[in-house]
Image (spheres, rainbow, N blue to C red):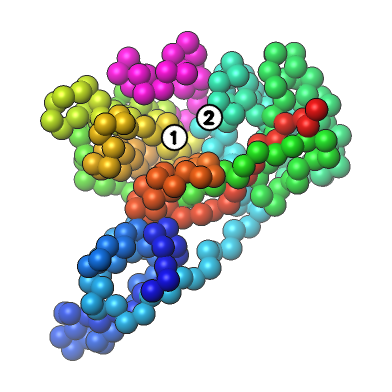
Amino acid sequence: MRVSVGDRVVVRYRRQDAAGAPPLSDVLGVLADLSPDTLTVVRESGETVAISRGDVVVCKPIPPKPVRASAIRALERAAADAWPGVEQDLVGGWMLRAGHGVSQRANSALPVDPTVATGDLLAALPAVVRWYADRGLTPRLHLPDRILRIPAGWRAGPDVSVLTAPATVHPAAGSTVAATPDAAWSAHHPRFADVPDVLTAVRDGDVAFLSRPDPQGSYETAAVARAAVTAMPDGTRVVSIAAVATRPDLRRRGHAAAVCRDALSWGAQRGATTALVQVESGGGAAAALYAGLGFTDHHRYRYAQPAD
């Protein structure tokens, strides 16, 4: 059984409750857990199916669903509106974002206009560079797969994976929800201490800061997350989950998964049908966390800066 958590799989298994129904059944989805006794698969609908390994007839990986360039553009626009920095501008088909230089996401230029030809996007780069230089910031491009290649004279960083899952309501896990980050939430993300406006900024949407109390009462917060609901150009609402963090001494106890489930519920209650997260290359623990919540690969992007 050569599969890994996070793979898209199809599983054929024996039904223990057949009772006149076909003795075998199939399930297709994301492999969320692979324990010695059980396989757990999350369907595209968000339904979780747990199967005893003794009942598995075959389990094999299948290719990810193909994603159109138009779907990448639409999701990236919703994600950009969820983390827009504190200043935005449109220049030559690029959405420019500035956020005091804190976080690449809030300080990068994203190609957003599908009607602008590649040559025109490249021709606008000097204006993009000047815009960031005028603000004392390093020019940085946010380049999704299949939208624009790394321009000549620019160097790219590592891949960032964009993962998606159905946004569904989960049983409440006890997280508190606030419109702004309090001191306990901010303690998990000290780099934003002097620029909280970067965290609270959202374009045409809602933002929330979730905190999961330590169930044993030893600490004020065990884990935190930021969630923002924005819309794709066609009106489809998306909840973007970011800034997930757990106290180092409380990791591997399910706190991050719990606060993420509450973030999914918060988004679904505000009309989101899709959820997204962004995971940097090498983020093994984060990738495993999100696979367990049913997230799968959608596309990737890279940041690029001038080479000299």
Q: Quadrant of residue 133?
A: top right
Whether residue 49 can be seen here: no
Vertical placement of residue 202 versus 9, above or below: above
Count of picture labels = 2
x%, y% of residue 132? Answer: 72, 20
- Pointer 2 residue: 83
- Looking at the image, the residue that sits furthest to the left is 216
Q: Is residue 225 left or right of residue 137?
A: left
The residue under label 1 is which amino acid type? Ala
Q: Is residue 39 left or right of residue 83?
A: left
Q: Residue at the location (13% across, 30% down)?
A: 216
Span of residues in magenta? 181-206
Label 1 element class: strand
x%, y% of residue 161? Answer: 54, 47
- Contact, CB < 8 Å: mark 2 with mark 1? yes
Quadrant occupied by the N terminus: bottom left
For residue 242, the mark is 1
Dot 2, how many residues are within 10 Å of its Cα: few (below 14), some (14-19), or many (20+)? many
Q: Residue at the location (27% across, 62% down)?
A: 35
The residue under label 2 is which amino acid type? Trp
The one nearer the camera, 49 or 136, is 136
x%, y% of residue 213? Answer: 21, 28
Q: CA distance from mark 2 to mark 1?
A: 9 Å
Does the magenta portion include 295? no
Label 2 element class: loop
Whether residue 215 can be seen here: yes
Quadrant occupied by the C terminus: top right
Q: Earlier in the sequence, mark 2 or mark 1?
A: 2
Vertical placement of residue 92 versus 76, above or below: above
Vertical placement of residue 89 versus 123, above or below: above
